[in-house]
Amino acid sequence: MVTRRVDLRSDTVTKPTETMRAAMAAAEVDDDVLGNDPTAFRLEAEMAKIMGKEAALFVPSGTMGNLISVLVHCDIRGSEVILGDNSHIHIYENGGIATIGGVHPRPVKNNPDGTMDIDSIVAAIRDPRGELVYPTTRLICLENTHGNTGGRVLSVEYTDKVGEVAKNHGLKLHIDGARIFNASVALGVPINRLVQAADSVSVCLSKGLGAPVGTVIVGSESFIKKARRLRKTLGGGMRQVGVLCAAAFIAVQENVGKLEADHKNAKFLAGSSLSKLP
């Protein structure tokens, strides 16, 4: 009998496919810090199109993608961001928004489904009449799927409601979409519609999609222009980055279609005897 071991530690331990490796070896490259890498351009243009945004930028990691996004939206020190108390940005990113950006986190309780109550979000927005003593609220962050609540998916209706709150109060909305493709597939909602209300989205390509490295952030052209400068400041400017972008492009083209099967397999395992093992 042949025993096959399946590594279920995390979707971060995926390996690049042979197609990805071949694309990396054949990638056309140039210096991306100078703005000349054609394969990076190709990936960024494709991701902007898929997400329904004007522009995109490849960065080394999701943590950097979120940090850059928050810093662009909160470019005045002492700004405040409303985010979930159990969100990845708040818990797992080394306090970077405060340490590096001088941005104050305003945590709101995450519900078991990953949402924050709309009324609680509104209540957390600072009264501008208290500007001499309060931080200035500038940004709301959502996470979809929400990792710390078991990968719960935020609906398009909920995201639209939060986007409406942000718009009505003159705020920006950022989505930590490390697994946003999973959310789109699970909901049966086109990804551009799912993130329509967001001013920026970070999308990880090295988790379930299987690319070896990288996240893409998307937003308006003016947002990405500022993001590119911050990427350089944070040490994320890379030279012949097309080698990595080539694998990420294959991940988007070939592996998004496999996520539905991944979801079915996960549900099968969750309901099998394996889930009952100590």
Image: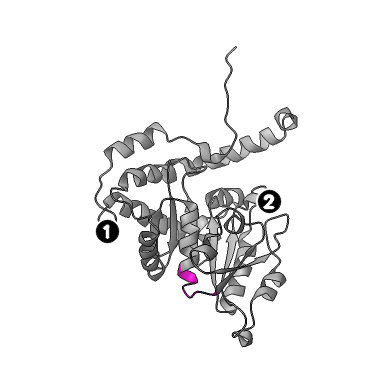
For residue 35, which numbered disc appears in the image? Answer: 1
Which quarter of the rendering shows the C terminus? top right
Asked if 71 appears above or below 86 in the picture, the reply is below
Q: In whole angstroms, how far apart are the C-alphas of marks 2 and 1? A: 39 Å
For residue 159, which numbered disc appears in the image? Answer: none
Asked if 17 appears above or below 198 in the picture, the reply is above
Give, as a three-letter code, the residue at label 2. Answer: Thr
Residue 206 appears in the rendering: yes
Residue 197 appears in the rendering: no
Dominant secondary structure, magenta: loop
**In this figure, which residue is indicated by the disc labeled 2?**
149
Give, as a three-letter code, the residue at label 1. Answer: Gly
Left/right of residue 201 with respect to residue 149 in the rendered view: left
Element at label 2: helix
Towards the viewer: 176 or 265: 176
Callout 1: few (<14), some (14-19), or many (20+) C-alpha neighbours within 10 Å?
few
Asked if 171 appears above or below 272 in the picture, the reply is below
Q: Quadrant of residue 248?
A: top left
Which quarter of the rendering shows the N terminus? top right
Element at label 1: loop
